[in-house]
Image: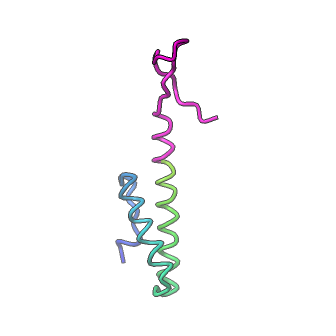
Amino acid sequence: MSETTETPSDLNFEDALKRLEDIVRKLESGDVPLDQSIALYEQGEKLRGLCQKRLEAAQAKIEKITLDREGKPAGTAPFDAE
């Protein structure tokens, strides 16, 4: 069961999301004992947080393209989420 209780922080987004999807599938199946369901839920919450951090980091790196008066690309500016 060590696979279901460990959440390595060095997982990339895609691997963390895949693990999270696997956990959700197991929990939705209803075939998991209560104690294991609780452990899976806790791991899922950690993975959700990890995915959120990875998404926020990616968003911070996004740059938007700025256009000049003629509508041609003139450069980039930092991403502004608001």
Q: Nearer the viewer, residue 1 or 50?
A: 50
- At 41% from the left and 71% from the top, the residue drawn is 22
Q: Give percent across and percent down for residue 58.
A: 45, 40
Instruction: Name the outermost residue toward the right.
Output: 82
**Count of marks placed on residues:** 0
Does the magenta-highlighted stretch encompass residue 60? yes
Position of the C terminus, as image quadrant, is: top right
Instruction: Name the outermost residue toward the front.
Output: 70
Q: Give percent across and percent down for residue 42.
A: 51, 69
Instruction: Name the outermost residue toward the top.
Output: 69
Q: Is residue 56 above or below residue 13?
A: above
- At 46% from the left and 87% from the top, the residue drawn is 31
**Residue range (magenta):** 54-82
Indicate the colouring scheme.
Answer: rainbow
The quadrant holding residue 19 is: bottom left
Position of the N terminus, as image quadrant, is: bottom left
Q: Nearer the viewer, residue 14 or 5?
A: 14
Q: Give percent across and percent down for residue 80.
A: 58, 31
Does the magenta-highlighted stretch encompass residue 56? yes
- At 50% from the left and 59% from the top, the residue drawn is 48
Q: Is residue 71 above or below residue 80?
A: above
Q: Give percent across and percent down for residue 11.
A: 36, 54
